[in-house]
Image (cartoon, rainbow, N blue to C red):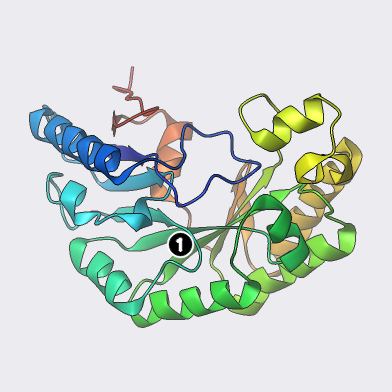
Amino acid sequence: MAGVYISYPFCAQKCTYCNFASGVSPAALQDRYTASVIAGLRAAKWQWTPETVYLGGGTPSLMDPRLFLDEIPGRPWREATIEAAPGTIRFEKAAAWRAAGINRVSLGVQSFVRSELARTGRKHTAETVAGDVAILRRAGIESINIDLIAGLPGQTRESWTESLDWIERIGAPHASVYMLEVDEDSRLGREILARGSRYGAGDVPDDDAIAEFYEMAVERLARAGLRRYEISNFAREGYQSAHNLKYWRREPYLGFGADAHSFDGE
């Protein structure tokens, strides 16, 4: 099953923990980038018709994804995902996504706890996420993923339980649980490595605690009907990410944009 991945590396803000090739850039650069990706899509040699599309980032929900989707053959795709930042979704936008072929949305929540979010630079609340999920469902998008990070500054067993509670409360059919990555590519990572205190670096849980949080998630999400189907992903039956599974199954895909790559199946 072939797919397409498109990277949109622009955000409204750069989060402290983020080590992706993304950030805040002038609108003119975003426009030039979009035009370049469209040119690449138009020049592509489609040896197969894609069944899945994934718009990652960055925050691709900040732009009009139809500019890219209109250049990709195969609509309606089996699965078309867009990553979105909580608080950026309105009904008109979600309805337009659905009309364009998007049937799955991945929300970069990371935490439902206000104090943890404040240290990352994120501005949403748990209630914001619940509202976004309700909007997506009203627009006809039922396949929704919630991203969580285990190991954020100040995170405790109790606060982690609160985030897991919210997954069940909003009835999310899919969750991704990532353990905090510490490296030179994020502000928080650099501060931890330098043994500093900015961004809450001194309050990051130790490795044993983070491992415990992950194991808690495996058990708790399973009780909620979301079973682990690969290292970081949990889903109810029928809601597994068809696009992400192709990476594990060595199926072909074309990548477009900065930090994207392709794989021909061999």
**In the foreground, 200 or 103:** 200
The one of 131 and 165 positioned closer to us in this rendering: 131
- Which quarter of the figure is the C terminus placed in? top left
Q: Quadrant of residue 36?
A: top left
Residue 140, horizontal then vertical, whole percent: 33, 76
178 or 238: nearer the viewer: 178
Q: Quarter-wise, where is residue 146 in the image?
A: bottom right
SS assignment at label 1: loop
Q: Residue 73: name its quadrant.
A: top left
Identify the residue at image location x=31%, y=29%: 252
Task: Report the number of discs.
Answer: 1
Q: x%, y% of residue 7?
A: 35, 38
Residue drawn at x 63%, y 53% is: 121
Residue under pointer 1: 238
Q: Is residue 215 left or right of residue 32?
A: right
* Left or right of residue 202, residue 131 in this image: left
Picture coordinates of residue 63, whole percent (x, y): 29, 54
Q: Residue furthest top?
A: 266
Name the side, left or right, on which 46 lies relative to 198: left
**In the image, is residue 173 above or below residue 240?**
below
What amino acid is found at the position of numbered circle 1 in the picture?
Gly
- One can see residue 1 in this view: no
Disc 1 residue crowd, few under 14, some 14–19, many 20+, Cα 10 Å: few
Q: Residue at x 32, y 25 (%)?
A: 262
Question: Where, quadrant-wise, is the N terminus in this rendering?
Answer: top left
Q: Could you tell me if residue 246 is visible in this image?
A: yes
